[in-house]
Amino acid sequence: MFKALEQGEHEQVVYGYDRASGLKAIIALHNTALGPGFGGTRIMKYASDQDALTDVLRLSRAMTYKNSAAGIDFGGGKAVIVADARKEKNEDLLRAFGKMINTLNGRYITGVDIGTTEEDMVVISKETKCCVALPESYGGVGSTSAVTAYGVFHGIKAAADIVFGTASLKNKSIAIQGLGNVGFVLARYLIEEGATVIGADVNEDCINRAVKELSIDIVTPDQIYDQPVDIFSPCALGGVLNDQSIPRLKCKLIAGAANNQLDEDEKHYAMLHDKGIAYGVDYILNAGGVIANSHQFIGYIRERAYQEVYTNISKNIDKVFKIAERDQISTIEAAKNLAEHRLEMAVQRKKWFYK
């Protein structure tokens, strides 16, 4: 474990077990230079304890870069609960987890992820104040799907301005992979902008809703890679840009909401670059949720939160592409440099108080 922490430069990992509720959880804090570790809780039945640890370490590290680049004063943290969310999630489990969070004395703040909902956060909040993504009726943001889609939409416009010479998406063609909560709202924004949208999903309910409410064209999940479009927008699973899919792409820009879109960062970015395809970094584009959730601590006002999402994501996409062009590096490296610079400045500021 210590070898894994050293390699990822994590600060702390906490295991929690509660016999009465059956809680088996891991909280990982990657970097708290900017503030408390901030990231959602994933409930999943992992194949092994090692898989759970690997996942929480990877996710918490990603949150450090997402939160830093997003311009919010929170560090990187994440939690996993080893359980079947459909069968084993209950009040006792969630409240035990809330008590576990409190043992960290404010160093970790949780929110929703796979297997958790804003209603779950209400239960957790009965035991800890270190909890966001509550329903709006409880002073929180509620579901972050809409605000995430809003941020991705404006991030796409900012990237399009660089790649195509105009931020307008009117008459642009976009293929959206994944028409779930984020992909569906994104498709609606794009259609209202005047874009042509092609969609795909493995879920028939998502397809039926998109066809009924948006009247978009649908292709099979495999065919989505072959569409001759201006923009390809992954909004489902990670690792979709790989050895098999990249040669099939016929677009000029990739910009979507999915996490970890590149199966292997350096290798597959190089393949995209060789094909002349620009890459909008995932954690820059999909930061709308964490930005909006951070407003819960200052009193959530929807208009203010959405304005910050628009401003920060649009500016950061522009910065990342300009840094990449200036330094002749990938947009992945440029995004990492942007995030690490802010982390370094946070460390330097602490020197004013701690010798």
Image: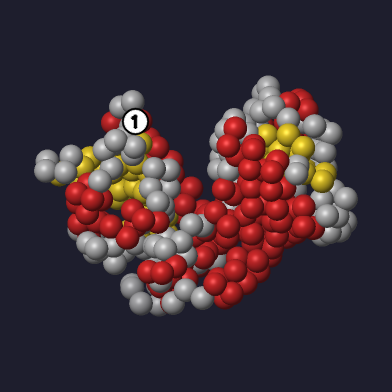
Q: Which residue is mark 1?
A: 46
* Residue type of the residue flagged with mark 1: Tyr
Q: Quadrant of residue 15?
A: top left
**Residue at image point 83% right, 55% down:** 194
* Left or right: 74 in relation to 17: right
Name the residue at the top extreme: 244
* Left or right: 300 in relation to 239: left
Q: Quadrant of residue 80?
A: top left
Residue 301 vertical position relative to residue 151 in the rendered view, above or below = below
Residue 22 vertical position relative to residue 106 in the rendered view, above or below = above
Q: Quadrant of the C terminus?
A: bottom left
Q: Position of residue 175 (x, y in %)?
A: 74, 39
Residue 230 seen in render: yes
Frontmost residue, 219 versus 9 = 219
Residue 74 seen in render: no
Kind of element beneath mark 1 = loop
Q: Quadrant of residue 32?
A: bottom left
Frontmost residue, 227 versus 220 = 220
* Left or right: 266 in relation to 77: right
Q: Quadrant of the N terminus?
A: top left
Q: Position of residue 66 (x, y in %)?
A: 52, 54
Q: Position of residue 166 (x, y in %)?
A: 86, 58
**Residue at image point 25% right, 46% down:** 90
**Residue at image point 29% right, 35% down:** 87
**Residue at image point 71% right, 56% down:** 189
